[in-house]
Image (spheres, helix red, strand yellow):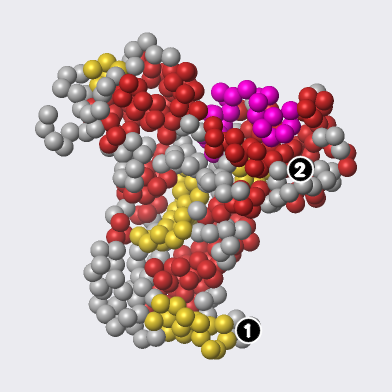
Amino acid sequence: MATGHSTTLDVFGTSRELPANYVIRDHVDFKFIDSLTKDRHVVIHGSSKQGKTSLRKKHLNQEDYKTITCQRSWTLVDIHDAILKEAGYSVTLSNSSTANGSRKVNLQVGANGSENEEGDSSSVVVRPLEINIESITDVIRALQSVGFDKYVVIEEFHYLDESTQIEFAQALKAFHELSKICFIVVGVWLESDKLTSLNRDLDGRITSVNADSWLDADIDSLFESSERLLNIKFSSDFKNDAKKYCRGNVFLVQQLCLNVCERQGITRQQDSTTVVAHDLDVYGEVKDILESQTGHYNKFLMDFSVGFGSTEFDLYKWILCPLITFTTHNLENGITAQALRRFLEKRHPSGSMIKHGRLVGALLKVMDLQQEKKISPIIVEYDQTRMRLKIVDKGFLVWREFQDVDELLSLADLSDEYKLST
């Protein structure tokens, strides 16, 4: 067979490159493209492995953007520092200070300018600058001095402390008003107005794109593209069951397709059209695939449940309890802190003694706890603005449906206490 024909790994595999069967979703891709043409900041949000990175790579060339990956400990100054370095500056502390006592920094670009990602040097020559790195206007001035005109992609925004998120949301307004620099903010959360809830002045200056949104019609397009590339035909029952059991989790759909193709010995484009996955137990196949995630999710349940150490009320394992026992429908929009408090009052052995403020204090640290336990990607978050605990890993929601509830309660050390409370 001629070289260059698609392989199953090209189509369904996980790699740094775009999958060959990438699907243009009108409600996602066109919205993203449209926002880029209007000089707006863009927010791309959704669960892990649902297409956030692929969306950007599909519609932007690598030389069009610079990427910043956030860390939990970062402040706004750290973000500014990272952006300036990506623009080609070396950043060093100055001996002088601002009026409020903050240290200024010196910025220096080499005589030949900065190098781009291909190693080519620009011809920009900039005199050394001394700026207040906390000042957005100073940072904008420095970027304009080197003719910086790329998109700035902010990855892992959800890891930042909420106070830093708020500061950055305020900075985005200034970037929009004082420069042509546009940001693409990428994070794991569910709501479309995450950043505008942090700064209402961003209304009209930002577009939010939900990469998590995979409609049945989108999955159908994924099947059609894959069939065309590999010269195969998935059975109708397989496609219907895949949509039913994968619940919009496109990563799971891709894994399922890869497995059934490899089981039939299909590793590349076929010479003649081949029917795939006829009379297959799709539920069993999906369950088998999800088993590969069991170690990760079991670790989450066990590690999260112990919290930061032994405490009087063991709040973190009880925070897990509704995430294990509630229906998927009741979890899709999250659980309010008030509802969680009522749940604890009814189920927790000392529920009447747990004050609302103490519960909220624990909820505010769920991100820190997952970071400490090295749980990545994150599975739950607490939205302080809406006061809701949310599962942000769609894979966990699907995996949970294939598990025995008693076993999950046991992993979280809840089995006996929960049974006593019923």
Q: Which residue is mark 1?
A: 101
Seen at 50% across and 41% down, the residue is: 47
Which residue lies most toward the right here? 353
Seen at 13% across and 36% down, the residue is: 3
In the figure, is residue 221 to the left or right of 199? left
Which labelled disc corresponds to residue 49?
none
The nearer-to-camera label among 1 and 2 is 2
Q: Which residues are magenta?
A: 393-415
Q: Quadrant of the N terminus?
A: top left
**Is residue 406 shown in magenta?**
yes
Task: Give amino acid for label 1.
Answer: Gly
x and y percentages locating residue 368 in the rendered image: 64, 53
Decide: few, some or many residues near mark 2? Use Cα within 10 Å; few <14, some 14-19, many ≥20.
many
Q: Which residue is mark 2?
A: 315
In the figure, is residue 405 to the left or right of 259? right
Picture layout, residue 287 above or below residue 95 = above
x and y percentages locating residue 279 in the rendered image: 37, 10
Picture layout, residue 155 above or below residue 97 = above
Q: What main secondary structure does the magenta stretch of the protein show?
A: helix
Q: Quadrant of the C terminus?
A: top right
Task: Give amino acid for label 2.
Answer: Leu
Which residue lies most toward the top here? 279
Picture layout, residue 331 above or below residue 18 = above
Decide: few, some or many residues near mark 1? Use Cα within 10 Å; few <14, some 14-19, many ≥20.
few
Quarter-wise, where is residue 37 in the image? bottom left
x and y percentages locating residue 361 in the rendered image: 75, 51
- The answer to which of 351 and 296 lies nearer the viewer is 296
- The answer to which of 175 and 87 lies nearer the viewer is 87
Can residue 208 be seen in this snapshot?
Answer: no
Which residue lies most toward the left here? 2
Tell me the SS state at disc 2: helix
